Image (cartoon, rainbow, N blue to C red):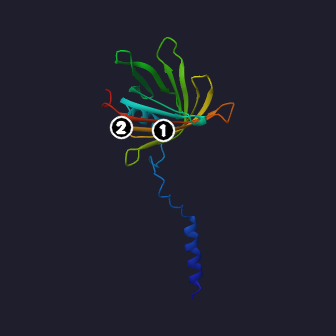
């Protein structure tokens, strides 16, 4: 064995150690790995979802209780960082229900468009991946939310989507009682072409 052989083996071993591990086959990569501005990514994701949606919600509560609901909505962009959410009224006509605004640095707020003008949620996006070659994007956000009984929950949300499909998982934990938790899923399918 030449004197260079051990050196070659050592260099090959070092190169192998320096290479990132292969991604497990069961992990599905979603969203581009290219760097992106957080707010640009969020605005593009919301605007790409302009149009009508059929949304389905499921929540799994402590004690094994599972509940679900579904509904219809429309998303109408009204600016680079604002969107109106429309819901059907008693006649079935879609009317403005709330407005979502991106205030920058991933800070979004939704406010009802009625006389009460109450805040529905304040959401902070911490990560956003623009669409990859397949058209799928991904985001991670956190928000605080009150349940119908007044219990306050801290929510960590991970979502995936395309222009025609949306899916998210919420991990909900009690603000003052860590033992209080819930899991919620949200799925959506486009019902109509994008709004003009």
Q: Where is residue 88 in the image (x, y as percent from the top left)?
A: 38, 20
Distance between mark 1 and mark 2 Cα atoms: 14 Å
Q: Position of residue 120 (x, y in %)?
A: 53, 23
Circle 2 sits on which residue?
A: 164
Q: In which quarter of the image is residue 154?
A: top right
Circle 1 sits on which residue?
A: 168
Q: In which quarter of the image is residue 182?
A: top right
- Residue at 47 percent across and 58 percent down: it is 25
CB-based contact (under 8 Å), mark 1 and mark 2: no
- Residue at 50 percent across and 58 percent down: it is 24
Q: Position of residue 117 (x, y in %)?
A: 51, 15
- Residue at 44 percent across and 48 percent down: it is 32
- In the image shown, does 125 or 74 lie closer to the viewer? 74
99 is higher (above) or lower (below) than 37: above
Secondary structure of the residue carrying numbered label 2: loop
- In the image shown, does 166 or 139 lie closer to the viewer? 166
31 is higher (above) or lower (below) than 64: below
Label 2 crowd bin: few (<14), some (14–19), many (20+), radius 10 Å: many
Secondary structure of the residue carrying numbered label 1: strand
Q: Position of residue 137 (x, y in %)?
A: 43, 42
Label 1 crowd bin: few (<14), some (14–19), many (20+), radius 10 Å: some
Quadrant placement of the N terminus:
bottom right
Q: In this view, does 82 lie to the left or right of 66?
A: left
Q: Is residue 9 left or right of residue 162?
A: right
Q: Residue furthest front?
A: 64
């Amino acid at each position: 064995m030449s004197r260079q052989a051990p050196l070659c083996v050592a260099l090959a071993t070092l190169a192998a150690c320096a290479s990132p591990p292969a991604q497990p086959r069961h992990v599905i990569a979603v969203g581009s790995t290219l760097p992106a501005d957080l707010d640009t990514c969020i605005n593009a994701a919301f605007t790409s979802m302009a149009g009508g949606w059929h949304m389905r919600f499921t929540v799994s509560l402590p004690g094994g209780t599972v509940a679900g609901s579904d509904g219809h909505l429309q998303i109408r962009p009204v600016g680079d960082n604002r969107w109106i959410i429309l819901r059907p009224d008693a006649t079935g006509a879609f009317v403005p229900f709330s407005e979502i605004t991106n205030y920058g640095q991933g800070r979004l707020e939704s406010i009802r468009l009625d006389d009460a003008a109450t805040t529905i949620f304040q959401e902070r996006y911490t990560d956003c991946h623009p669409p990859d070659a397949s058209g799928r994007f991904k985001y991670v956000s956190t928000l605080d939310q009150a349940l119908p009984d007044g219990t306050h929950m801290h929510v960590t949300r991970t979502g995936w989507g395309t222009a025609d499909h949306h899916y998210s998982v919420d991990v909900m934990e009690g603000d003052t009682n860590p033992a209080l938790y819930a899991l919620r899923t949200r799925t959506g399918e486009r019902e109509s072409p994008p709004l003009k």
